[in-house]
Image (tube, grey):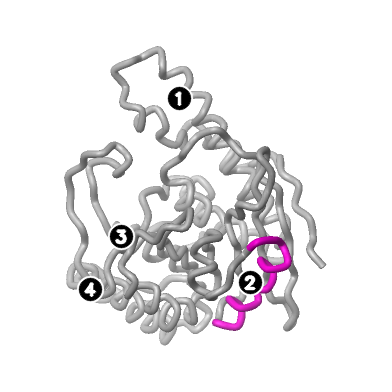
Amino acid sequence: MLSLSVLISHNHVHLQVLGLEIDAINSVQFSNHTEYGKWKGQILSPEELGDLYEGLKMNQIHNYTHLLTGYIGSKSFLLKVKDIIEEQRLNDPKLTYVCDPVMGDCGKMYLPQELLEVYKNDIIPLADIVTPNQFEAELLTDMKITDIESAKQAMMKLHSMGPKTVIISSLEFGSELDLFGCGSTITNGSPTMMQVHIPRLDAQFTGSGDLFTALLLAWLHKHSDDFQLACGKAVSTMQHVLRRTLAHSKQAVLHPDTPSAGRMELRLIQSASDIKDPQLCVDVQTLD
């Protein structure tokens, strides 16, 4: 079984479906996600994160093979995560750290600027796998991505910052029918690069970034010798889940009392078979 340490995410049931043992720590605990417009709940403080980690250490149950982080909203919390990663690396230099640097999208940063510098200087250099979207990749590299060639240059810049594997989850210079995704992994000192065409769906989804990064962690572990297959399975799973979610949302219109955000909750339980054994439905191509 694969033991995954700190999962700062809203969704982790899909990792359990894939046979991973999970210890999940939520950076936020809300009644519902924020697209509903109203919510109640708590935000975990750096001190509370430290308490939870100390409790794991007291019982000698703090040794993990992987650590995954997603949305983090404060500099102090992000720096506490850095401390934990560094301590974990002292215990096991082979620890795989997967970082989804959630900072913004569509040209808009929705975190304080100071977090960008922490990501650049402290977090990304510790990461083995990093999964920014196009806007986040541009922020981290100080480069504008306008086509596949500039995306390749940005991935190489991210490699130079530390990560062995870089996935840019969505690139907006595709057509009206599809997006691009691209990735690169360093093998024997040289990059292996790929691109994938991702069919566009006429909807906005919440939580899809969390899902995608977690799926990548699982499939990159299971297919450590086949980068294209791992990426293909992660993207294909996303397509199955999102299409099922969109189909459900159209059926839910028959129930007018259901909030629109509720109609678009990701159909993870209903997609368990696709998560466990996804049928490949996207074309992954090697980049020269």
Say which residue appears at 72% left-offset and 57% top-offset. Answer: 195
Is residue 228 left or right of 166 when viewed as pictured? Answer: right
- Give neighbour class at mark 4: few <14, some 14-19, many 20+ (Cα, 10 Å): some
Q: Which residue ends up furthest to the bottom in the rendered image?
A: 90
Say which residue appears at 69% left-offset and 76% top-offset. Answer: 186
Residue 97, position in %: x, y? 48, 72
- When asked about the image quadrant of residue 109, the answer is bottom left
Is residue 89 left or right of 81 when viewed as pictured? Answer: right
Is residue 97 left or right of 116 when viewed as pictured? Answer: right
* Residues shaded magenta: 146-161
- Residue annotated with mark 2: 155
Say which residue appears at 23% left-offset and 47% top-offset. Answer: 30
Label located before the other in sequence (2 or 4): 4
Task: Identify the secondary structure beneath mark 2.
Answer: helix
- Residue annotated with mark 4: 50
Depth check: give the residue in front, 156 or 27: 156
Name the magenta segment's main secondary structure: helix
Cα distance between the residues tagged 2 and 4: 33 Å
- Residue annotated with mark 3: 25
